[in-house]
Image (cartoon, grey):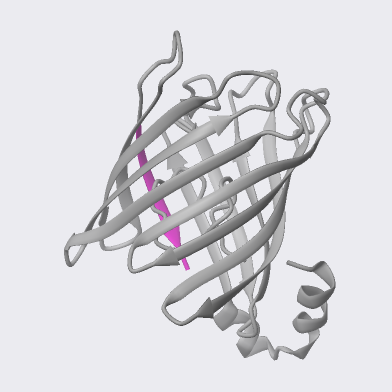
Amino acid sequence: MMNTTTMRTPQPRRAAAAGLTLSAAALALPTASAEDWAERTTFEFGVFSDYLDTGESVSKNNAVAQGGIEYGHPGGPFLGTAVSTLDGNEQGQEVVPYLGYGFTAGEVDLSLAYEYAYYPEQDDADEGEVILGAGWRGLGAELAYMANADDSDAAGSIVYALGYGFDVAEDIALDATIGYDDPDDASGDAFWELGVSRAVDVGEISLVYGSRDESGAQDVFVAGYSVSF
């Protein structure tokens, strides 16, 4: 979910899910039986040595625990919520509800989503992004536009990302992402992330490296374990 470099399918940057309208998603929910709900709902939990986003640490190099739930309807609408701890002190937690719509055009997977990042322990930190994603045969592209933010300087920022993921063995995958973080009020910075993951008997272990072309930026290495069901 959050600590991921793979872009095999379009997904919101933080919530790592694919897909638009709340009304469409909400109307779809009551039509599902209890069995359908279980089949279309995904839960995920993970622990990571850091929280990596656009090539930099979000948690001040502290370990984090992350979890999420997502419901996806066969017709395309989806919604979910992802939660992460941050530095354990003044940063508190990050809560990211999201919703969207995904569909396929030929061999291309497309999605449009909105996610709202809420920080209950921080002042003037909440922000919402509109995210357009596309995926084709392991290749993914994404554009995330900061539609609204408590910090007015952050509004209007755009993140562009291009990634590729593939399996090198039955239980081992490699992923790479390059991107450009373009703030509305400052010069932008390129970033990149490389990751390897391996499926184990229960869950998945991963190792990710990320960095940014920014003065004073630190390279970030993230080890993690996650399980989904």
Snapshot quadrant of residue 176: top left
Residue found 80% across the figure and 85% down from its top: 30
Give the farthest residue toward the top: 216
195 versus 211 height, above or below: below
144 versus 198 height, above or below: above
Marks counted in the figure total 0
Give the farthest residue toward the left: 169
2 versus 215 height, above or below: below
4 versus 108 height, above or below: above
Q: Which residues are magenta?
A: 222-229
Q: Is residue 118 left or right of residue 48?
A: right
Q: Nearer the viewer, residue 30 or 105?
A: 105
Percent across and percent down for residue 137 are 33, 69
Q: Main secondary structure of the magenta part?
A: strand
Snapshot quadrant of residue 93: top right
Q: Is residue 173 left or right of residue 180?
A: left
Residue found 69% across the figure and 65% down from its top: 100
Q: Is residue 9 magenta?
A: no
Percent across and percent down for residue 87 are 58, 23
Q: Is residue 133 left or right of residue 190?
A: right
Residue found 54% across the figure and 44% down from its top: 66
Percent across and percent down for residue 126 are 78, 34
Percent across and percent down for residue 54 are 49, 34
Residue found 75% across the figure and 33% down from its top: 119
Q: Is residue 225 magenta?
A: yes
